[in-house]
Image (cartoon, helix red, strand yellow):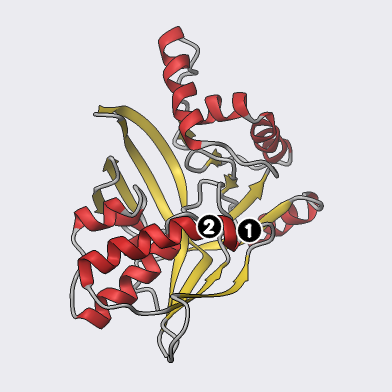
Amino acid sequence: MKKVSTGAKVNLSLAVTGREGDMHTLDMRVCTVSLFDSAWMPEGEGERFVFGRAAEGFSWERFLPRLDRIYERLHAAFGGAPRFALEKGIPSGAGLGGSTALAVCMTKLWAESAGRTPDDALLLSLGSDAPYMYIGGDARVTGRGERVERLPFAEREVFILLPGEGVDTAKAYAGYDRMKETGELPEREGEYHNDLFAPAAKLVPAVGEAYALLRSLGAERVVMTGSGSAVCAFPKDAEESERLFAATRGYTRFKVRTLPAYDGN
């Protein structure tokens, strides 16, 4: 029984570049880290989904409508009616690709069983992160997420801090539009930046507090990932990562590492 895993996505940078229709276009640098969602196809008959372990606070019941929509799209593309056993280690609503990772796992399994290869349009229909997360590794992602340029892999320590409250993605982008119109957006500074940080922190002050906490602890390379709420630091070594972990007791946090492009196994 083959098990496929998809690693979480972390932004090193995110710039909003414009709009295409009702969607914003982006220019992002991203990497994959060792925090996973997984799936496999169990034998026998039964419900289409078998639910296993999940990240703390995650509700399979609330996520089920999205899983059903993913299933129907994949059924239309590949045919058949496989069953899936699912495990969820990536928090949702954190900007880590947690709403897309299981879709990528299911796509890889279903496409292989059908002897097919998913096209870019199918992947993009599963989520703007899906074309990138299907490949993984270091990359530059542009447009609505459909253009993925692989970059040389850089091995990094990554420390992820969750403020405890999620950010609504649609509200973050709406806040960005308002702040841009009124001239409130801060200038981009340095290599690690995210245009959605200011609107996200305005919506959820705990995001800004998490960022400030990591900076106060000496982390120099800190950036919010996606539309939030997770804030990530890139420690210079494992010792610094351990120090950040010890100093943030009481928070939900992860010590992870970057991964190269991979086949999901």
**Residue 42 seen in the current view:** yes
In the rendered view, tell whether residue 213 sits above or below residue 17: below
Quadrant location of the N terminus? bottom left
Judging from the image, what secondary structure is the residue with disc 2 in?
Answer: helix
Q: Are marks 1 and 2 in contact (CB under 8 Å)?
A: yes
Give left or right: position of 85 versus 118: right
Q: Residue 90 placed where, x, y %?
A: 55, 60
Query: In the image, residue 59 lies at what x, y percent?
Result: 62, 59
Q: Local crowd at mark 1 within 10 Å, few (<14), some, or many (≥20)?
A: some
Amino acid type at image mark 1: Phe
Amino acid type of the residue tagged 2 in the rendering: Phe
The percent coordinates of residue 37 (x first, y second) are 50, 67
Q: Is residue 103 above or below residue 220?
A: below
- What x and y, as percent, mark residue 127? 35, 50
What is the C-alpha distance between the residues marked 1 and 2? 8 Å
Q: Quadrant of residue 229?
A: top right
Residue at the far front in the pictured view: 46
Q: Residue at point 42% right, 15% down?
A: 180
Quadrant position of the C terminus in the picture: bottom left
Give the residue displayed 32% in from the left and 63% down from the top. 72
Q: Which residue is mark 2?
A: 63
**Closest to the observer, 66 or 254:** 66
Q: Between residue 251 and residue 239, name the one nearer to us.
A: 251
Q: Which residue is mark 1?
A: 58
In the picture, measured across the screen, residue 227 lies left or right of residue 115, that is: right
Please state which of the two labelled residues, at mark 1 or mark 2, is closer to the viewer: 2
